[in-house]
Image (spheres, rainbow, N blue to C red):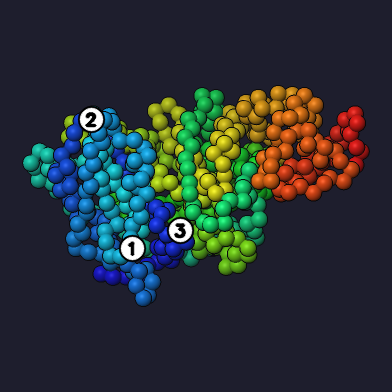
């Protein structure tokens, strides 16, 4: 049965046309077993799973009418078997290369598999195209694969429950949901999406991405528990609120939309495999006078209302006029937050062999920054995916450290205005040894002044035109007529520091110009 692609499906295809021969739409399920698997049994179990789920028997082809999808009665999935010589298990880089192989939309299957046999452990890597798969599909497919493998290994029949899997057809957004999102985004202008640490990037679009893993500190984890009680909010809302605040303290906002993925499955269709997720544009106002409590309360209300209206994809509200924005960049939001209340390092057994899931990214990033929060036995884990054309790894590492420390302080800062929050981390304080952040809003200005005196050669701003040390930065700040700078971010730093001096009435230092 052939059908034309929906708008969401076409958007996935169009993204691939911008970055051809990449894995931008590739998703994966990777797990490692201690011991050896039978390649033959694994292949037959894969066939069982594919026959069960209609989405996995769907192929795509680009024809005269654009992207077309066709559901086949039978699709043959390949299983590539690799020996990993002299290694206990396959390394992450090799898995990433496996995942990064693109699918050709020429009528072939949109799922493939590989088995890597090590000296001590075997690793299975399933790769699927987003057209037929999403994160929740991964859990269903893994569970089905375990069931089918164990039945085949025991020479038994598949259980009666292993019948035709659930199929969830695309549904049209309800009028109520469309009205809600129109109200939610009324008056929104995507002018405040940039961060101070963003870079211009290479004009040749690659969507190259990297990932930074972070375990929440005990202090931040304890703060989350306190904030849940104080705000009467779930963990997802607490972590999301801190994400908004961190973005605001790095230059985004004050009117800010963050993308939050939500499943469109209802209670009866949780086991459906396919592309059943919409990115929801959650909005928050982060004006300098708003308190942390007010921001978190707004985020909580928006979060629950959004989950009640997940049937409208964010693409519905993308502005038609993109201005001078590049074609690949989302014009509604650039930052994403995803919370899954489970540990992605799921442990299980497969035919009696201990097994554990591994999280391996595909090496691309559709968004500037994505926080993926998941649970472990005792804390939250952050997998922070970022676009390397927009952000440097060092800046992302610093931003995540500030997020952690901000989160740890929030229980005592609930009634503090956003404009008076500090995003300094321990690493920042170490980098500016002369800075003893004061209670007043002039602490940054004073910190730069003291550092210019005590460590004038320390780098303050890095630009494409060269580095700016604290001595040079201070000369620009205190000059009667600040010379033009080659880099907008450096100019922004000077402007912000000069404004701090004016707004707080900070007295000029000895020898400082009065302008």
Identity of the residue drawn at 38% across and 35% down: 343
* Disc 1 packing (10 Å; few <14; some 14–19; many ≥20): some
Q: Earlier in the sequence, mark 3 or mark 2?
A: 3
- Residue at the extreme bottom of the image, as rendered: 64
Q: Earlier in the sequence, mark 3 or mark 1?
A: 3
Q: CA distance from mark 2 to mark 1?
A: 36 Å
Q: Earlier in the sequence, mark 2 or mark 1?
A: 1
Marks 2,1: beta carbons within 8 A: no
The quarter of the picture where the C terminus appears is top right
Residue 19's disc number: 3
Identity of the residue drawn at 48% across and 37% down: 212
**Left or right: where does residue 502 sit relative to residue 385?**
right
Identity of the residue drawn at 50% across and 30% down: 216
Give the number of the mark in front: 2 or 1.
Answer: 2
Classify 450 as above or below 340: above
Is disc 2 placed on a helix, strand or loop? loop
The answer to which of 22 and 176 lies nearer the viewer is 22
Q: Residue 240's spot in the image, x, y percent? A: 54, 41
Is disc 1 placed on a helix, strand or loop? loop
The answer to which of 94 and 215 lies nearer the viewer is 94
Q: Residue 234's spot in the image, x, y percent? A: 49, 38
Residue labelled with disc 1: 105
Q: CA distance from mark 3 to mark 2?
A: 37 Å
Q: Residue 153's spot in the image, x, y percent? A: 12, 39
Q: Is residue 72 visible?
A: yes
Q: CA distance from mark 3 to mark 1?
A: 14 Å
Identity of the residue drawn at 28% across and 53% down: 111
Residue labelled with disc 2: 119
**Left or right: where does residue 59 sit relative to residue 154?**
right
């Amino acid at each position: 049965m052939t059908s034309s692609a929906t708008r969401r499906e076409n958007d996935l295809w169009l993204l691939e046309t911008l970055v051809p021969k990449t894995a931008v739409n590739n998703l994966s399920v990777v797990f490692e077993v201690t011991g050896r698997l039978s390649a033959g049994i694994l292949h037959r179990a894969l066939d069982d799973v594919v026959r069960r789920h209609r989405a996995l028997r769907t192929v795509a082809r680009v024809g005269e009418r654009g992207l077309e999808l066709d559901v086949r009665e039978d699709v043959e999935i390949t299983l590539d078997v690799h020996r990993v010589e002299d290694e206990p298990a396959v390394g992450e880089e090799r898995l990433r290369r496996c995942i990064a192989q693109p699918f050709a939309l020429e009528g072939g299957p949109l799922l493939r598999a590989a088995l890597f046999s090590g000296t001590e452990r075997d690793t299975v890597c399933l790769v699927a195209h987003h057209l037929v798969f999403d994160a929740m599909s991964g859990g269903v497919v893994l569970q089905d694969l375990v069931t089918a493998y164990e039945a085949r290994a025991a020479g038994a029949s598949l259980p009666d429950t292993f019948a035709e899997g659930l199929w969830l057809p695309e549904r049209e957004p309800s009028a109520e949901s469309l009205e809600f999102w129109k109200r939610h985004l009324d008056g929104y202008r995507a002018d405040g999406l940039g961060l101070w640490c963003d870079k211009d990037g290479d004009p040749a679009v690659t969507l190259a991405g990297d990932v930074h893993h972070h375990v929440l500190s005990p202090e931040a984890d304890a703060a989350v528990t306190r904030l849940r009680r104080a705000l009467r909010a779930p963990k997802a809302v607490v972590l999301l609120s801190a994400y908004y605040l961190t973005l605001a303290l790095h230059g985004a906002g004050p009117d800010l939309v963050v993308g939050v993925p939500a499943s469109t499955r209802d209670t009866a269709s949780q086991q459906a495999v396919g592309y059943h997720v919409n990115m929801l544009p959650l909005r928050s106002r982060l004006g300098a006078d708003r308190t942390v409590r007010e921001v978190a309360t707004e985020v909580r209300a928006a979060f629950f209302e959004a989950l009640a209206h997940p049937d409208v994809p964010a693409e519905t509200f993308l502005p038609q006029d993109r201005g001078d924005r590049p074609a690949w960049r989302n014009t509604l939001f650039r930052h994403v937050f995803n919370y899954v209340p489970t540990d992605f390092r799921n442990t299980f057994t497969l035919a009696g062999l201990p097994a554990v899931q591994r999280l391996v990214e595909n090496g691309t990033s559709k968004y500037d920054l994505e926080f993926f929060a998941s649970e472990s036995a005792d804390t939250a884990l952050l997998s922070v995916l970022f676009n390397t054309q927009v952000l440097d790894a060092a800046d992302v590492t610093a931003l995540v450290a500030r997020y952690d420390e901000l989160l740890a302080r929030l229980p005592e800062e609930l009634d503090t205005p956003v404009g008076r929050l500090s995003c300094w981390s321990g690493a920042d304080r170490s980098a500016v040894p002369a800075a003893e952040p004061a209670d007043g809003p002039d602490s940054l200005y004073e910190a730069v002044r003291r550092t210019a005196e005590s460590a004038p050669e320390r780098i303050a701003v890095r630009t494409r035109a060269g580095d700016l040390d604290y001595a040079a930065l201070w000369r620009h700040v205190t000059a009667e007529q600040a010379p033009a700078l080659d880099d907008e971010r450096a100019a922004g730093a000077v402007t912000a520091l000069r404004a701090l001096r004016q707004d707080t009435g900070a007295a000029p230092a000895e020898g400082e110009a009065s302008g």
